[in-house]
């Protein structure tokens, strides 16, 4: 049996009929030992897209949350309503109060539910700062150390501390990625890569030793990165000879086009309905 990753929520769709796009990200992982959901999108497309693509949301072993932004957590109640209790893995900061600020406007962009509400719907939260093996060969990275000078974060994303001060940019310490062990190497799945793709790859390389990264899929946040960061990221993806790079969501078309030009056949768009089999 292969490892199969299917994108269920993304900004655009990869097939001509029946699928819906929304700003957000979610994907469905099938492994020989069970199925997992990584993120939920913002809530309008997960259920219809999963139904259309034949992915059973009630048959998952666990839900992995990349970070506490609305566009990755908005369908949490819908997922919980289809399960009889569910293990949910993430970082303790996923419930932080966070906002998007620009030109005097402030919009709430955090997780749109109270923890108590989700608990009442059957959520069993496992919130952890360390690397966790969620199931056989399926991992959530834990907190990513921020080590390089290029990946500064997005200054429009801010967060409130417990004492009511605003932190700018939001440190987004809860930005985690999923790592799946496959016969061809590691599959690295990103939510938004707020921690910086180079930081994430460095940490995964450190934690998984000699296992090479075969594929990277998901939101890269490169649409908001400076040229220095973008060039350094391109160099790294090239140098590591990652065989499949499927970008989604916060990558944006201009950066995706540059990635495609540089990576050639190794590049693909990760839209709703895109399937990667390893
Ligand atoms: Fe996002
Ligand atoms: Fe995000």
Image (spheres, helix red, strand yellow):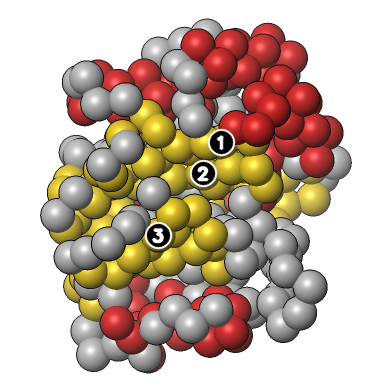
Q: CA distance from mark 2 to mark 3?
A: 12 Å
Q: Against 33, is 229 above or below?
A: above
Point out which mark residue 29 bears. none
On-image quarter of the N terminus: bottom left
Q: Nearer the viewer, residue 31 or 23?
A: 31
Q: Nearer the viewer, residue 166 or 88?
A: 88
Secondary structure found at label 1: strand
CB-based contact (under 8 Å), mark 2 and mark 3: no
* Residue reaching furthest to the front: 1
Q: CA distance from mark 2 to mark 1?
A: 6 Å
Task: State which tag comes first along the sequence, 2 or 3.
Answer: 3
Residue depicted at x 69% and y 77%: 19
Residue depicted at x 32% and y 37%: 184
Residue depicted at x 49% and y 83%: 54
- Give residue 220's quadrant in the image: top right
Secondary structure found at label 2: strand
* Residue 37 image position (x, y, % from top left): 38, 66
Q: Nearer the viewer, residue 164 or 205?
A: 205
Q: Is residue 260 visible?
A: yes
CB-based contact (under 8 Å), mark 1 and mark 3: no
Secondary structure found at label 3: strand
Task: State which tag comes first along the sequence, 2 or 1.
Answer: 2
* Residue 143 image position (x, y, % from top left): 30, 35
Task: State which tag comes first along the sequence, 1 or 3.
Answer: 3
Q: Is residue 153 left or right of residue 249?
A: left
CB-based contact (under 8 Å), mark 2 and mark 1: yes
Residue depicted at x 67% and y 12%: 231
Q: Which residue is mark 2?
A: 217
Q: Which residue is mark 1?
A: 245
Q: Which residue is mark 3?
A: 4
């Amino acid at each position: 049996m292969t490892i199969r990753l299917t994108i269920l929520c993304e900004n655009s769709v990869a097939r001509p009929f029946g699928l819906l796009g929304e700003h957000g990200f979610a994907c469905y992982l099938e492994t020989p030992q069970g199925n997992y959901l990584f993120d939920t999108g913002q809530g309008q497309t997960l259920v219809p897209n999963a139904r259309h693509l034949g992915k059973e949301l009630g048959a998952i072993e666990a839900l992995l949350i990349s970070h506490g932004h609305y566009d990755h957590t908005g369908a949490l109640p819908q997922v919980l309503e289809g399960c009889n209790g569910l293990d949910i893995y993430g970082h303790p900061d996923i419930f932080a109060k966070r906002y998007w600020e620009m030109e005097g406007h402030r919009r709430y962009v955090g997780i749109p539910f109270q923890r108590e509400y989700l608990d009442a719907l059957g959520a069993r939260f496992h919130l952890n700062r360390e690397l966790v093996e969620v199931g056989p060969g399926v991992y959530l990275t834990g907190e990513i150390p921020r080590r390089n000078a290029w990946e500064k974060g997005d200054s429009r994303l801010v967060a409130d501390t417990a004492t009511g001060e605003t932190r700018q940019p939001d440190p987004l310490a809860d930005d985690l990625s999923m790592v799946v062990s496959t016969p061809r190497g590691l599959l690295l799945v990103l939510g938004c890569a707020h921690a910086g793709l180079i930081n994430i790859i460095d940490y995964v390389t450190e934690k998984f030793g000699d296992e090479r990264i075969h594929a990277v899929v998901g939101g890269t946040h490169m649409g908001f990165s400076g040229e220095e960061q973008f060039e350094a990221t391109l160099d790294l993806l090239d140098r590591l000879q990652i065989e499949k790079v499927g970008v989604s969501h916060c990558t944006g078309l201009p950066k995706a086009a540059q990635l495609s030009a540089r990576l050639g056949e190794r590049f693909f768009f990760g839209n709703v309905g895109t399937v990667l089999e390893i």
